[in-house]
Amino acid sequence: MARWQPDAPGRLAAAALELFEERGYENTTVVEIAERAGLTKSTFFRCFTDKREVLFGGGTVAGALIEGIVSAPPEAGPLDAVADALDALGRTFFTADRREFSARRQAVLNVNTELREREALKRADLTASMIEALDRRGVPNLTARVAAQLGTLAWEIAYEQWIDAGNGEDFGPLARRALAEVRAAGVVQ
């Protein structure tokens, strides 16, 4: 693969995933990832801070999540704004052409403690991003925190369903259904 081809981050992520599947996360180096992608080590570090980050997409998801909440219709309540943001993520990041990659990525994460810890930190960062976005909308802090936590739970449920090879449903409807179920469970006495 020529070095001038576009999408260095995507190429690096694909190469890293292949190598992690073949050799394991611990047995793969940044140099090997860059070589597999047809790039240099310095290009890797221009795209990602370290080897863990290559499967986590940088801050692009958080930015899209914030934008989705902030740009929700003014009359949308906190959970509806979160649902709008999850829909937007589905259209942008959780597309049909990314489903197989995402399922493979999750399998690699599931067998590696360091990557699961990183995923948990990213999830906490995304929850904080939702709280920040809801705060911008004027939502009281406690309400924003609850809505963000429920949104994160719905995201996790929807993501697990979405990466299931037997499920062909889009992420957005899965996320909305999961959010409705989480919302309903919260009012159970």
Image (cartoon, grey):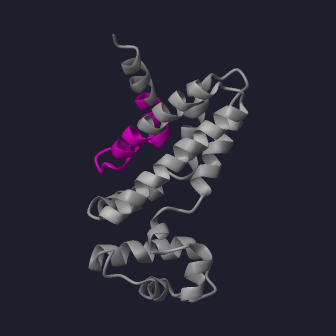
- Taking the spot 38% from the left edge, 71% from the top edge, the residue there is 17
> Horizontally, is 24 left or right of 65 in the view?
left
Q: Position of residue 113 (x, y in %)?
A: 30, 62
- Taking the spot 62% from the left edge, 78% from the top edge, the residue there is 46
Give the tally of numbered discs: 0
> Horizontally, is 128 left or right of 171 in the view?
right
- Taking the spot 51% from the left edge, 28% from the top edge, the residue there is 146
Q: Decide: is 44 above or below 94.
A: below
Quadrant in the picture for the C terminus? top left
Q: What is the span of residues highlighted in magenta in the rendered image? A: 155-178
* Magenta stretch encompasses residue 171: yes
Q: Quadrant of residue 167?
A: top left
Q: Position of residue 137 (x, y in %)?
A: 71, 30
Q: Position of residue 174 (x, y in %)?
A: 42, 36
User: Can residue 95 be spotted in the picture?
Assistant: no
User: Can residue 154 be spotted in the picture?
Assistant: yes
- Taking the spot 68% from the left edge, 43% from the top edge, the residue there is 67
Front-lying residue, 103 or 188: 188
